[in-house]
Amino acid sequence: MFVISGQRLISPIALYPSALLSDRRGSKIYQGAKMPEETNQALQDRVARLERDLERLTTGVSLLGIKSCSWCNKFLRSDPATLFDPGTPVCYGCVLEWWHHQCNQRSVKEREIIERALKTWLLRYHHAEVVKNPQKLPKDPLPRLQIVVSCNECHATGYAQGSRCGYCDGRGTVWIVVPAG
Ligand SMILES: [Zn+2]
Ligand SMILES: [Zn+2]
């Protein structure tokens, strides 16, 4: 079939150079080798553009005092009670799951530093209480959050000045509990 363009007759091959190899086997080889390469390049350009846009957006949003939680990726106003931020911000709703994950990932030293900061943050901003005796942990209703932390008084040894640590009753750990309600 021929197409009329002005006064000349142009074959479909001239209009569509990719049809040069339009016999069945040739076409397959040509398209199979060339097309994905072009598509990948276009896709890479688009992803790079989106990354740049996202970076600009994130910078803009942080200027408004908004940060994203590193665990759920939600954007939240970055006031001290909303986000716990020991280098990577994490929201209150995610902090427990995040902390359990950190316990398996971090070194002992890093864990100690974060644990201390987390304890202070929960006590200061979330009305947490220190519970020394596990028998006294609230059960009904269950607390909103509870974590076990090392006792600072005896450095988790259970002993202070040669006798049983009075702060943790010799356990070396205490519970930080955010009551329900
Ligand atoms: Zn979160
Ligand atoms: Zn102690």
Image (cartoon, rainbow, N blue to C red):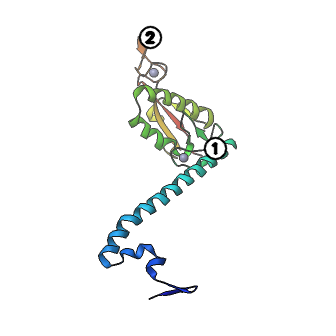
Q: Is residue 56 above or below residue 170?
A: below
Depth check: 54 or 94 in front?
Answer: 54
Local secondary structure at mark 1: helix
Asked whether disc 1 touches disc 2, contact meaning CB atoms under 8 Å apart, the reply is no
Q: Identity of the amino acid at label 1?
A: Thr
Q: Identity of the amino acid at label 2?
A: Gln
Look at mark 2 in the image and give the residue it sits on: 161
Depth check: 115 or 53 in front?
Answer: 53
Q: Residue at x 42, y 22 (%)?
A: 156
User: Is 56 left or right of 115, judged from the image as shown?
Assistant: right
User: Is 66 left or right of 98, judged from the image as shown?
Assistant: right
Ligand 1 within 8 A of label 1's CB?
Answer: no
Q: Is residue 138 visible?
A: no
Q: Position of residue 13 (x, y in %)?
A: 43, 79
Q: Is residue 115 above or below residue 7?
A: above
Q: Position of residue 155 (x, y in %)?
A: 44, 20
Q: Looking at the rendering, which quadrant does residue 62 occupy?
A: top right
Q: Residue at x 62, y 41 (%)?
A: 82
Q: Earlier in the sequence, mark 1 or mark 2?
A: 1
Local secondary structure at mark 2: loop
